[in-house]
Image (tube, rainbow, N blue to C red):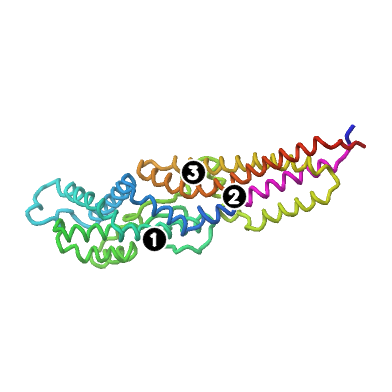
Amino acid sequence: MERNPSRWVATGLAIVAALGIVATSTTMWAHRYPLDSDRFATAAAGVLDDPEVVEALSSAATDEAIDLVLAVADPRQFLPGPLQGLGGEPERWIRDQVAGQMERVVTTEQVQDLLTASIREAHREVLSTIRGDDTGSGILAFDGQTVRLDLTGVIAAGLDALVGRGWAPGALGDLHEAFRSGLDGLRLWLVDNAGVDIGEDIGTLVVYDASDVDDGGLALRSARWMSGAGSLPLLVWPTISLVSIALLVGLRADRARSLAIGGAAAVVLAILAHLYVLRVVADIAALVDDSGARQAVEGIAADLVGPLLVPTGVIVVGGALVALLAARSAESRPTAHV
């Protein structure tokens, strides 16, 4: 009967080493891609000119613009004189003009750059909110649970275009100047000049809501925890893997057998880790109702997840080769018994 406890220790160390290798690869990818605000913004810039995404952004900006107008005054006063007596039509007229112009505005280089910068800041704010620290700008997060994207710059560009084409009166000049100062500046301008407080939400778009994540899948909730304060430093997993390998080398157990087990474990764990990431992406996309916004999420995710295929493939192929060669070596050696 086989009685060699060191073999069981060696097996455990091989599995721990495999776990460390996979965790190191996945953690490094996460820090370099989805948790890096610059790379996230670059990925977002790649989908901002997609027609469905443009339509979704234009629709959101239009809705916010109309809400702002309605919050300040009767929309008829912003129409040219002959159109002020149209009864219930002014809002529809404004919405049609703004919506059509917003689609053109969103595709301009100026607005694309503005949106990319705003997305970068929103991403940083999301990470700050998740981690529970105060390192974010504080401009987009209003209650510690929700992060919003400030669309006032996009709306200002849309109003500029409307005024320039003669579709809105020049009297809007002061208002769209206030838009350029961001949401806080716009709120102050409206309080000072119109005596109206539009609140903290108008002119913004929700990009992260903790309550939605709470209602999402287990993979998404666990990903939030790992990207928050509970995440481990980058050097932890490589250290665990190296220590396990060093201890494994120092044992007198059947190293070939242990290597075979470790290689197979690396293959399984790498595949499971990749499937987990894909599940997180699916959970995020499931939270988005608008088809254009969902396409944007899926496009950004594809850009960020793509680089993970390389280390995953290397681990799977390398682990499979190690397992195969070690298993053949173990079969060619006599088994030690006590």
The secondary structure type at the circle numbered 2 is: helix
Q: Residues within 10 Å of mark 3 (few under 14, many from 20)?
A: some
Question: Going from the N terminus, do you reach mark 1 or mark 2 first?
Answer: 2
Q: Residues within 10 Å of mark 1 (few under 14, many from 20)?
A: some
Three-letter code, disc 3: Val
Q: How many marks?
A: 3
The secondary structure type at the circle numbered 1 is: helix
Quarter of the image where the C terminus is located: top right
**Disc 1 versus disc 2: nearer the observer:** 2
The extreme right residue here reads 338
Question: Going from the N terminus, do you reach mark 2 or mark 3 first?
Answer: 2
Task: Please report contact status of discs 2 and 3: CB closer than 8 Å, yes or no.
Answer: no
Seen at 33% across and 61% down, the residue is: 183
| Viewer-side residue, 100 vs 86 | 100
Magenta residues (range): 3-24
Q: CA distance from mark 1 to mark 3?
A: 23 Å
Q: CA distance from mark 2 to mark 3?
A: 15 Å
The extreme top residue here reads 1
Question: Going from the N terminus, do you reach mark 1 or mark 3 first?
Answer: 1
Q: Residues within 10 Å of mark 2 (few under 14, many from 20)?
A: some
- Which mark is drawn over residue 117? 1
State the residue position of label 3: 281
Q: CA distance from mark 1 to mark 2?
A: 27 Å
